[in-house]
Amino acid sequence: MIELTGFGWRYAGRRAWAVRDVDLRIERGERVLLLGLSGAGKSTLLAALAGLLTDESGERAGTIAVDGRAGVLFQDPQTQLVMARCGDDVAFGPENLGVPAAAIWPRVRAAVDAVGFGYPLDRSTHALSGGEQQRLALAGVLAVQPSVLLLDEPTANLDPPGAALVRQVLARLDTTVVLVEHRVAEALPLVDRVVVLTPDGIRADGTPADVFARYGDELADGGVWVPDHPVLPRRAAAPAGAPLLTARSVAVPGRLAPTDLDVCAGAAVAVTGPNGAGKSTLALALGGLLRPGSGTVRATPALAGADAAARPPHAWRAAALATRIGSVFQNPEHQFVTGRVRDELALGPRRAGAAPESVRSTVDDLLTRLRLDRLAEANPYTLSGGEQRRLSVATALATAPRVLVLDEPTFGQDRRTWTELVDLLAKLRDDGAGVVAATHDEDFVDALADRTVRL
């Protein structure tokens, strides 16, 4: 049983409460889908239920009680992988709970088999793709045999077959489940109750049929992903222009098979494929952040100018790279280097030599366009997953590059911010930029991509 009465939480250093006035009771064995806009406090509520919000990290209001052991799966699997080898990582939880040694490895093998993790147990955790890490992290949670399972976007980094497999695993579990998931239609068969959260408390609570029948249009207008509310495609305004960036037989041993790809002005390319196929590796190579093991990545004079075009992007100086090719990493926090959202956005233009007035104008514009203005003074690491994603996109746009390379750009977005992000990328494309997105989001591909490359 879970019970919250008047619960609220405010992170240290923040004026606004992440969530407040939450009254909620979840009975043993219930399966609850927790919905809400990006920044509504969903991840904060899961962290509270997991016992991870300490008095030193913020201010609490009200009471919260959880009967039983809670296991939590975070949005970013890297935040909970702690060992160098996969099997040791899954064993870490049972070891700390004092499970007898003879029982630990059968638990580990059962957990990795349940999530379809097909690698040897001695494989390095750092050699896994983001989706593979997510599957391993879920196995680690299952190995502790929790009575309350807290899931924060458990399929966001998974390819469709992997996501379907995880949902099958969850459907078989006999435990209380609180699930945050933007893929609402796929999640509905797993739950018997929907709770809609706002920063000021619970907006709706009931069966999926009742909640969507009564509040469906309102929720969709407000930004919640609601079944049977499709999004419209954003087709290119004109045919694709000349190539800006070309990849020929680009490969990285063990990470990416030889791949060809052209990034053209005024075109959006979606890079798809199963977890581990090399999508993130290709994105790093295109972004000039990884030297290919073989093959070439070349910028045309239209992107780089005559001098820079003679050298591959990975050999450019950082300032030159940032003004030509912008990169958005799969894990947003990997590209944050300051303590304030405003400073994060200002860093690129300043290093590119922009005047102070221009820097301020650029920062203010991006804060507004990506709905980050109320968070301008916040620490980037205290933002929700969806807010961090929008900030990472904004930092890449701050130097006005002509090519934008994004890795899972829609991760963690509600319907409203997803739509605004797609509209923003569509405008950049129609203004002549080249856009490359590595993604599992089929709706994103349908809405924006002019061409799809499957690895």
Image: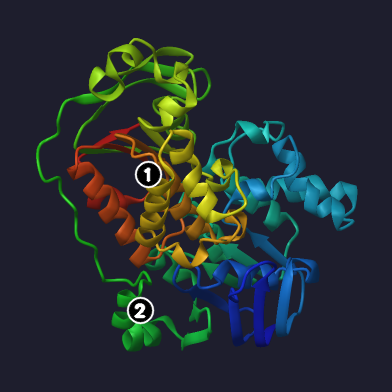
For marks 1 and 2 on the same chain, the one whose residue lies earlier in the sequence: 2
Residue 237 in the image: state x and y as whole percent: 11, 46
Amino acid bearing label 2 = Leu
Secondary element type, mark 2: helix
Query: Which amino acid is tagged 1?
Result: Leu
* Mark 1 secondary-structure assignment: helix
Residue 451 in the image, given as x and y percentages of width and height: 22, 37
In this rendered view, identify the residue nearer to me: 275 or 345: 345
Task: Indicate the position of residue 277 as horizontal and vertical percent values.
Answer: 44, 32
Where is residue 148, by image quadrant? bottom right
Name the quadrant containing residue 83: top right
Left or right placement of residue 138 versus residue 427 in this view: right
| Residue density around tag 2, few if under 14, some if 14–19, many if 20 or more, within 10 Å | many
Quadrant of the snapshot with the C terminus? top left
Q: Is residue 55 left or right of residue 148?
A: right
Q: Is residue 393 visible?
A: no
Q: Residue at x 42, y 52 (%)?
A: 360
Q: Is residue 194 above or below residue 408?
A: below
What residue lies at 39% left-to-right and 15% top-to-bottom? 312
Q: Quadrant of the N terminus?
A: bottom right
**How many discs appear?**
2
Q: Residue furthest left?
A: 238
What mark, if any, has residue 236 been given in the picture? none
**In the rendered image, the vertical position of residue 353 relative to residue 61, given as above or below:** above
Which residue is pictured at 73% across the width and 35% down the height? Answer: 85
Q: Which residue is under mark 1?
A: 397
Marks 1 and 2 in Cβ contact (< 8 Å): no
In front of the other: 203 or 101? 203
- Determine if residue 378 is in view: yes
Task: Say which mark, if any, is on residue 219.
Answer: 2
